Image (cartoon, rainbow, N blue to C red):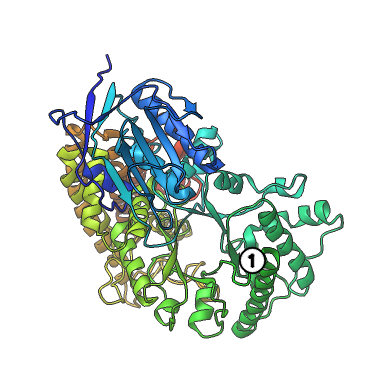
């Protein structure tokens, strides 16, 4: 039988500035002994009054509030257009005159008790949306990551809110805070299963107080009447999010729809995609700019020039020049044309724009070939170095003079980085953004993090959201403790917080840091284990043996801005590189054996957040332990190329290790996430297993 409780809320930080949703949970205390004088009792069915002038995005968040009220209190609350004596009031700015003054400032918000009413108030639209979710978390106990933790909110009979209850949250440190959901091999099939799954990302962004979605603005629907935004952009708009383009999607356009545009909009055969066809490109960009403005989307205009996928333009356009300076000149001309289009379409002299210095752009800037446009409203969006994710040479050598600055960091990196297990961690994220903010002279106005599949990276994403809201007060130890108290309860929080930190520090650092004071600059993330295994297997299948099998990977191409696929020491001497792998994996194995033993011990005792603990920390630690064992044994097999029996034994051990790693992954296939990891196409566990099985029979 389900138990119900009477909860008395005592917010001990009345009126203080709370930087993030996680802080609310720490500062919320429950007491049954406190006097009930002047307190408000919230019971199931309490009406919710939404001011009639509130926009669609606020009303969409109110739908989530109604669901939360029903889930916690067990009765359906109704919207009312009449302000009753006891109600939850949702109003932006000065639309409601209560006992507290209106909040002021970009996205500032507050929640407070006013007699028998709870007032949910924001300085602007998103401020009010954030206030709605702040109430859900601080009063109803609905956690920001509830969709990802496999844990439902606790049912209550009633909630008692003290007279002094007041949460006041001032404006964020970083104005634009974005997610970039790229490389979505796991989440895409899951999103297609239900509308709730599709919406989960958007709701989570707002609960964590993000405000910008990076992606495409158009899809196949956008070229037929009534010419709407693409599905993802439409939902972002309905939710009150700002939209900005992916670094290859100018104004959110995608060359995938080039033919559709020309045939359905222009009623003609598509011209070839060539640099010389600048007029055709101009018409294409102009259409997407007007598509956004006609649909009243809130846009940060992405300018730049790349290929039809994540490649430089010179790999796609057949008439591209060959020299770095000529290539930079083409980009410069294209960007200037795009800036003209945005100014024309918006009618603004200084529209908010963004140029992402990704990959080849970073190299062109660092080498002095490309000069950033002199546009005061252009966000110079620098990007972390590929594969190892630290401030790259372009930003470290750039002379700032007060320009608006952005920074892009990967938590997930599909070819050689973190994919099935989180690796970069909150501390590395913090170091990146603090360095960039310092280099820019405190002018960091835009942040974006890439974690396409989301689920594996929710702790890192939460840390980033908290830091971007309040950079001054953020520190990793406090974040870990707060996060763990929120999701795992007080009893085990300190222990789990230390375990998270130990897990991130267990990664093999295959190369020493070369930025002074920068911790864990180079890491051997899970996708590197997959590609390293394939490299060794490929040689053994061909009967090859090399002293440096991890040198000269096919994707090590400085011309594309890509270098350091493995970054394992190279030497003409025999076994130096292979012994480095053995030493690195052995070190990680020793650390992870301790971490998994501690995690197993906690798992037996923990009650709150047990499933999430298993999915997000314990399971990932066991997975990485098995990957390290797999690569260790496979390296031993490679070294034993002339000893057939030893080689076969090591290959068999490696096969058992990767089979165990896969089993740990599939433990997280449960409930709404059933078959989540059956969609893995990037890591390729099954293919590696098949190749190892074949090798073991030789």
Q: Secondary structure at mark 1?
A: loop
Identify the image quadrant of residue 38: top left
Relative height, residue 228 to residue 380 (above, below): above
Q: Residue at x 31, y 57 (%)?
A: 425
Kindly indicate the quadrant of the structure image that contains residue 349.
Answer: bottom right
Q: Nearer the viewer, residue 352 or 110?
A: 110
In the displayed orientation, state which residue is furthest to the top. Answer: 1
Taking 478 as reference, is 154 above or below it?
A: above
| Nearer the observer, 252 or 87 | 87
Given residues 650 and 554, the one toward you in this image is: 554
- Residue at the location (36% across, 66% down)? 433
Q: Position of residue 484 (x, y in %)?
A: 24, 44
- Report the side of 343 relative to 173 (left or right): right
Q: Position of residue 385 (x, y in %)?
A: 43, 70
- Name the residue rendered at 61%, 68% in the picture: 303
Q: Quadrant of the N terminus?
A: top left
Which residue is under mark 1? 307
Can see residue 500? no
User: In the drawing, does residue 478 fall left or right of residue 317?
Assistant: left
Which residue is situated farthest in the right direction here? 268
Q: Position of residue 436 (x, y in %)?
A: 37, 71
In the rendering, at what x and y percent does residue 403 appear? 47, 76
Q: Residues within 10 Å of mark 1 (few under 14, many from 20)?
A: some
Horizontally, residue 467 falls left or right of residue 500, namely right
Q: How many marks?
A: 1
Q: Tell me: 233 left or right of 31.
A: right
Q: What is the residue that sits farthest to the left in this orientation?
A: 33
Relative to 447, residue 217 above or below: above
For residue 432, say whether it is visible.
yes
């Amino acid at each position: 039988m389900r138990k119900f409780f009477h909860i008395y809320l005592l917010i001990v930080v009345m009126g203080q500035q709370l930087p993030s949703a996680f802080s609310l949970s720490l500062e919320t205390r429950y007491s049954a002994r406190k006097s009930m004088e002047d307190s408000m009792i919230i019971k199931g069915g309490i009406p919710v009054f939404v001011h009639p002038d509130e926009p669609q995005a606020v009303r969409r968040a109110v739908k989530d509030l109604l669901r939360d009220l029903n889930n916690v209190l067990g009765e359906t609350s109704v919207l009312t257009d009449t302000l009753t004596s006891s109600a939850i009031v949702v109003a932006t700015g000065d639309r409601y005159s209560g006992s507290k003054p209106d909040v002021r400032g970009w996205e500032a918000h507050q929640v407070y008790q006013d007699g028998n009413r709870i007032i949910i108030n924001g300085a602007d639209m998103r401020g009010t949306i954030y206030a709605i979710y702040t109430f859900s978390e601080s009063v109803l106990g609905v956690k920001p990551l509830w969709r990802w933790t496999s844990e439902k909110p606790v049912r209550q009979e009633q909630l008692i809110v003290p007279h002094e209850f007041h949460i006041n949250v001032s404006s964020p440190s970083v104005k634009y805070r974005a997610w970039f959901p790229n490389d979505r091999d796991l989440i895409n099939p899951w999103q297609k299963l239900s509308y709730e799954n599709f919406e989960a990302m958007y709701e989570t962004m707002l609960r964590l107080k993000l405000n910008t979605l990076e992606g495409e603005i158009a899809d196949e629907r956008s070229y037929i009447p009534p010419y709407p935004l693409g599905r993802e952009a439409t939902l972002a708009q309905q939710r009150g999010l700002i939209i900005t383009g992916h670094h290859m999607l100018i104004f959110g356009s995608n060359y995938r729809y080039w033919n559709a545009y020309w045939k359905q909009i222009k009623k003609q055969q598509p011209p070839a995609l060539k640099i010389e066809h600048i007029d055709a490109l101009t018409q294409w960009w102009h259409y997407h700019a007007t598509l956004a403005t006609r649909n009243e989307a809130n846009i940060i205009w992405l300018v730049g020039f790349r290929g039809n996928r994540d490649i430089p333009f010179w790999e796609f356009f057949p008439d591209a020049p060959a020299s770095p300076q000529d290539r930079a000149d083409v980009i410069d001309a294209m960007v200037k044309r795009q800036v003209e289009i945005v100014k024309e379409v918006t009618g603004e002299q200084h529209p908010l724009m963004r140029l992402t210095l990704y990959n080849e752009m970073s190299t062109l800037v660092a080498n002095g070939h490309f000069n950033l446009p002199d546009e005061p409203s252009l966000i110079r969006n620098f990007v972390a170095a590929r594969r190892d994710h630290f401030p790259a040479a372009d930003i470290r050598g750039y002379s700032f003079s007060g320009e608006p600055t952005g920074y892009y960091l990967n938590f997930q990196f599909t070819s050689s980085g973190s994919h099935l297990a989180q690796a970069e961690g909150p501390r590395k994220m913090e170091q990146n953004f603090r360095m960039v903010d310092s280099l820019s002279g405190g002018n960091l106005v835009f942040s974006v993090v890439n974690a396409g599949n989301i689920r594996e990276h929710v702790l890192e994403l939460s840390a980033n959201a908290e830091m971007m809201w309040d950079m001054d007060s953020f520190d990793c130890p406090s974040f870990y403790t707060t996060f763990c108290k929120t999701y795992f309860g007080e009893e085990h929080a300190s222990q789990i917080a230390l375990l998270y930190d130990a897990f991130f520090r267990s990664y093999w650092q295959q190369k020493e840091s070369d930025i002074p004071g920068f911790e864990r600059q180079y890491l051997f993330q899970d996708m590197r284990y997959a590609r390293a295994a394939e490299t060794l297997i490929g040689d053994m299948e061909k009967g090859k043996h090399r002293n440096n099998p991890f040198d000269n990977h096919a994707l090590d191409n400085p011309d594309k801005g890509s270098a350091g696929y493995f970054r394992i020491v190279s030497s003409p001497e025999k076994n130096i590189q292979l012994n480095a792998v053995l030493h690195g994996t052995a070190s990680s194995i020793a650390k992870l054996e301790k971490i998994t033993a501690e995690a197993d011990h906690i798992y037996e005792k923990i009650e709150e957040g047990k499933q999430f603990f298993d999915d997000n920390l314990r399971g990932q630690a066991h997975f990485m332990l098995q990957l390290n064992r797999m690569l260790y044994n496979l390296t031993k097999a490679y070294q034993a190329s002339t000893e057939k029996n030893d080689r076969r034994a090591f290959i068999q051990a490696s096969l058992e290790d990767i089979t165990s790693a896969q089993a740990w992954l599939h433990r997280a296939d449960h409930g709404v996430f059933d078959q989540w990891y059956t969609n893995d196409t990037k890591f390729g566990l099954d293919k590696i297993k098949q190749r190892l099985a074949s090798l073991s029979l030789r």
